[in-house]
Image (spheres, rainbow, N blue to C red):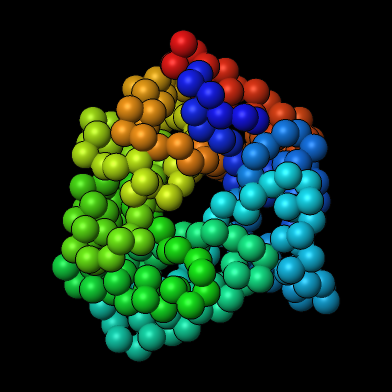
Amino acid sequence: MSQSASQPFKISLNTSTISGQKLSLMENIRVAAGVGYDGIEPWVRELDEHADGGRRLEDAGRAARDAGLSIENVIGFFEWAVDDDGRRAKGFEEAKRNLDQCARIGAKRLAAPPFGAHAEGTLDLHAAADRYRQLLEIAEPYGVVPMLEFWGPSKNLYRLGEALLVAAAAGRRDACLLADVYHMYKGGSPVAGLRLVRGEAIGLFHLNDYPANPPRGTIADADRVYPGDGIAPLGEIFRTLRDIGYRGHLSLELFNKSYWAEDATKVATTGLEKARAAIAKALA
């Protein structure tokens, strides 16, 4: 999809959206390309399964590029932010493994959520900034940028403001955020806060919607719905992203079990059509 004033964003498919269909990495690439997405966002487990089957990640990356897809990001889980030195050291080793996978498949970025620190204690955000800086330094030789992701249900790093502090205090020009419609809602981050962010400081934005029920206190990932089918202030979000100069990808990330029971191509097609319609409506 070419970018224009009415459609300033490209759209990627996060493979969680069709993960219940149990497709392979190559099958997910074919679905995303066939439907018309601009990019794809696979998970580390899919890369592992591909490599464990004796296949090269370089070939999967070439197949994606040949089909017109960029690999915008890879979703992985490694304990980069935890206080425990031993666990954090192991987390950095896993990060290196994931970064190597990203480099081989041609992915631009790697998600860095507060995994491990999301369910325990109180994380010192300045300590987290030092650890995020270390992660960025580790990633530099791979040519891949770890994006600081905040999780709404987490006990730590669950709001945009916290992520901004950590990213700013890391003191590196490549520091950037991975934001998400659902996580902003779940964690109580006001959309207006995005106006304090330069568009270039957002590496990727996860796109989804959510219903009025369950309420915010009990809503979960599985309750996410197609863009435009819920109550999220998508119009305000899209207009704000446009106004701050964000011109990256919106990556459709859903975990809805009812969608997982349907044909993967149908789900991917519906998601892309609804995403485009919601953007067009907001920016008309």
Q: Is residue 91 visible?
A: no
Q: Indicate the quadrant containing the N terminus: top left, top right, bottom left or bottom right.
A: top right
Q: Farthest bottom residue?
A: 86
Position above or below: 61 against 195 = below
72 displayed left or right of 69? left
**Rendered residue at 35%/61% (across/down):** 174
The residue located at (47%, 83%) in the rendering is 93
Residue drawn at (73%, 44%) of the image: 68
Percent of width and height locating residue 173: 30, 61
Q: Position of residue 184 (x, y in %)?
A: 33, 39
Q: Percent position (x, y) of residue 36?
A: 72, 34
Above/below status of 249 relative to 121? above
Residue 277 visible, this angle: yes
Does residue 119 appear to the left or right of 220 in the view shown?
Answer: left
Which residue is more in the foreground, 1 or 250? 1
Q: Is residue 81 left or right of residue 108?
A: left
Q: Quadrant of residue 91?
A: bottom left
Depth check: give the residue in front, 140 or 30.
140
**Residue 3 or residue 129, whichever sits in front:** 3
